[in-house]
Amino acid sequence: MKRINLLVILIFVFGIVAEVLPQGNFATSLHSTRKGKIHWYNKVENGGVGGFEVLTNVPITQLGCVECHDATDANGNQYPANYTPGCVDCHATNSTWAVTQNDCLGCHSREKTIINMQLPDVHRTAGFTCLTCHKKQELHGDDGVTYNSMFDPGAIQTDCSNSGCHAGFTHPNPGVDPHGGKLHCTSCHAQTNLACYSCHFESQVQTHLKRPYKQITGFIFLVNRTKDNKVHPATFQAITYEGKAGVAFGPSVAHTIVKTGARTCTDCHANYGGQIPAIQDFNADGVIKFATWNTADSTLSWHQGIVPLPANYQTALKMDYLTYNGNVSDPVQPSKNWSVVKDVADMFQVMYCTPLTKQQMSKIGMDTTLVSVEPINNQIPNSFALEQNYPNPFNPSTTIRYSIPKSAFVELKVYDGLGNLIQTLVSENLSAGNYEVQFNGSNLSSGIYYYQIKAGDFSDTKKLVLMK
C-alpha cells in the first residue's frame, strides 16, 4: 500500500512539475532555436535558402541578430553578453511565471509599432492579447518538430478558421464568396501591412543599427500562400548594401483586422470599376513602380491599397532602393539624407508564397499581354530554340516560346517589314529554361511582321502575321 501511495504522490508531483517547468520540447521551438533568421538570410551552404547573404557576403554571425532579444528579460534584468534563449525571455521566473503583453512586444517590435501607430484591430478592441490566440503549444514547441521558420506549416497553428474563432464561418449570402474558398480572410479584412523601407545594411553590419528610411503602411501585397494555396497578404524586406539592392517577400499580415471597412470588390478588381493605383500602373506599361523617391523634397511616395505580386515580378516590380548618405554611427531618426541607388533589385527572394498567376492577374483586371517573361516548366533544354508563334495568323495577341540552355542575356524584338523596331519583348539576363512571352498587336495594322531573338552567339528570326 505504501508503494502504491508513493507512486500516486510521484505521479501527482511530476504532473505539477510538468506544468510549471519548461516544456520538454522547448529546445525544438523557434523561440529556442531562432532558426527563422538563419533560414531566411543565409546562403544555402550555410543552412539557409539563398537569402541576403548571397548579396552581402556577410555572415549572419557578424550582424548581432542571431540571438536577438529585448533589452531586459521578463525579470527586468539586462541580458549577459553570452546569451542562451530560455524561459526567462518571456516568463517572470522571480514571481508568478506570468507572461505579459509587453514581454511579447519586447521582441515582436513590428506588432508594437502597429499598436504605437494606433492602427485599428478588432481583436485588440475586444481585449485580446497575443496569448489569446497564440497558445503555449505552439510557443513551447510541444509537437517536438524543429521548424525552419514560423511560416512552415504547423509552426503557427493560429488561424481565423480555428475552433473557437471563426470555424465554419460562411457568409449569409452564398454569393458573397465568389472566390470559392481560395481567398484568405485577411486579404479583405487586414487594413494594411507594414514594412521597414530600404534598410541601410552598412549600418547593420558596422554598428548593428537597424536603419530603414521609414516604416510604411497603407499597402498590402497579394500572393498565393503555399501553406494553403490561398491568396494572402504579404509584406517585404528591402535592403541596400555597397551599391546593391535586394528584396524578400513573405506571406505576412499585420494585426490590423477590421470588420467595418473591409475591402469590397472594387478595392481589388479594376475590371469591376476599381481605381487601383498598382493595377493602373501595371496596365500602362507592364511595370509596377511600387515606391518612388522624390528628389525635390527628399520624400518617398508609394502605392496605396492592394499591390498584386505579378507573375513576372523579377522584371515587372520596381521600387526606388535607397541608401543613407550619413555616418553609420548616426542616431537612427527621421532624416532626408538619403538617395536612390537603383530601382531594379539585384536579387529577389519569395518565400512560402508564389506570385499571382496570369489567370489570377486577368481576373482582377491586369493586362496579362504585358507579362513579358513566363517560365513554362522546370526543364532545362539542350539547345537554343525559337519556336513559331501561335496562333498565327493572330488578332490581336500571340504567344512566342523560346529555349535557353544556359544563362544568357536575351533580346527578343519585333520588327515591321521595313526593319523598323516595333517592340522589345525581352531584354534581360535569363537563366537556363523554357520561356514564353505574349505579343499584343492591337495598336498595329494588319500585315507581316518579324520577331528576332539574340542570346549569346545564337540568333534566329521568324515571321508572324497580324490579320484583323
Image (tube, rainbow, N blue to C red):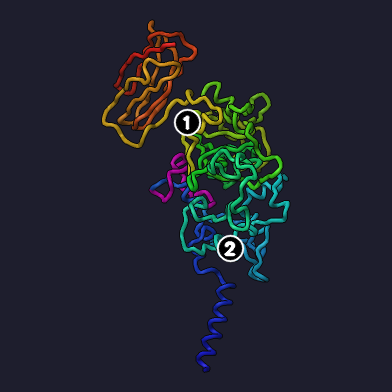
Name the side, left or right, on which 403 lies relative to 293: left
Q: Secondary structure at mark 2?
A: helix
Residue tagged by mark 1? 358
Q: Residue at x 50, y 55 (%)?
A: 154
135 inside magenta stretch: no
Residue tagged by mark 2? 136
Q: Secondary structure at mark 1?
A: helix
59 inside magenta stretch: yes
Relative height, residue 133 to residue 270 (above, below): below
Q: Which mark is residue 450?
A: none
Q: In the image, which is nearer the foreground, mark 2 or mark 1?
A: 1
The one nearer the camera, 428 or 218, is 218
Name the side, left or right, on which 224 lies relative to 305: left
Name the side, left or right, on which 274 lies relative to 229: right
**Span of residues in magenta:** 45-65
Q: Position of residue 348 (x, y in %)?
A: 47, 37
